[in-house]
Amino acid sequence: MIDPANILKTHDLKHTKQRVRVLEEIALDKAAVSQPDLEKKLGKEIDRVTLYRILNTYEDKGILHRIMDMNGTANYAICSASCTEHHHHDEHVHFNCTTCFKIYCLEVTVPRIKMPQGFTATTITSTAYGVCEKCNSSAVH
Ligand SMILES: [Zn+2]
Ligand SMILES: [Zn+2]
């Protein structure tokens, strides 16, 4: 379980109730949380502009990473501990469920791919599409 207060402290961010709420909301679900969902859940407490600013700060600091889903909507997930400011190490597989449309960060490392000469890859991402654990177990066979 993540500790929002501790994360803010580690990254030298001022402790505000709104910042804590955003982290709590994102840490709640195993799947990534979409921006529209966050707006829906936190709309009463945090206005859109503030939410947007908080998400940007978190992304900059390496606290969150953004994943685009099939419809081009931004989704946010907590970064692994190895992410630092301006240096994301989220080279893991992103799983897009085609049934519930949730995105999961999988603890599966993207294999190192040898680049052709003259190309330097700094980040390699990998996206998988299919049916997630939850949808598979609730499917009627
Ligand atoms: Zn699913
Ligand atoms: Zn991820």
Image: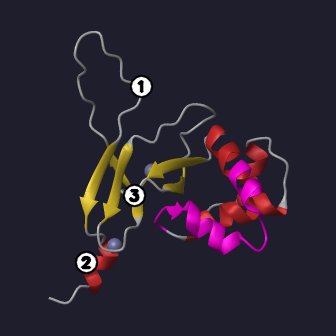
C-alpha separation, residue under disc 3 versus residue under disc 1: 25 Å
Which amino acid type is shown beneath numbered disc 1? Thr
> Which residue in the structure is indicated by mark 2?
136
Q: Residue at x 61, y 41 (%)?
A: 62
| Percent position of residue 125, x then y | 35, 40
C-alpha separation, residue under disc 2 versus residue under disc 3: 22 Å
Q: Is mark 2 on a helix, strand or loop?
A: helix
Quarter in which the N terminus is drawn: bottom right
The quadrant where residue 140 appears: bottom left
Q: Which residue is drawn at 52% across and 70% down?
A: 29
- Residue in the foreground of this view, choosing between 81 and 19: 19
Quarter in which the C terminus is drawn: bottom left
Which amino acid type is shown beneath numbered disc 3? Asn
Q: Nearer the viewer, mark 3 or mark 1?
A: 3
The label number, if any, that marks residue 122 in the structure image: 1
| Percent position of residue 85, x then y | 64, 34
> Which residue in the structure is indicated by mark 3?
71
- Residue in the foreground of this view, choosing between 23 and 51: 51
Q: Is mark 3 on a helix, strand or loop?
A: loop
Magenta stretch: give its range.
30-53
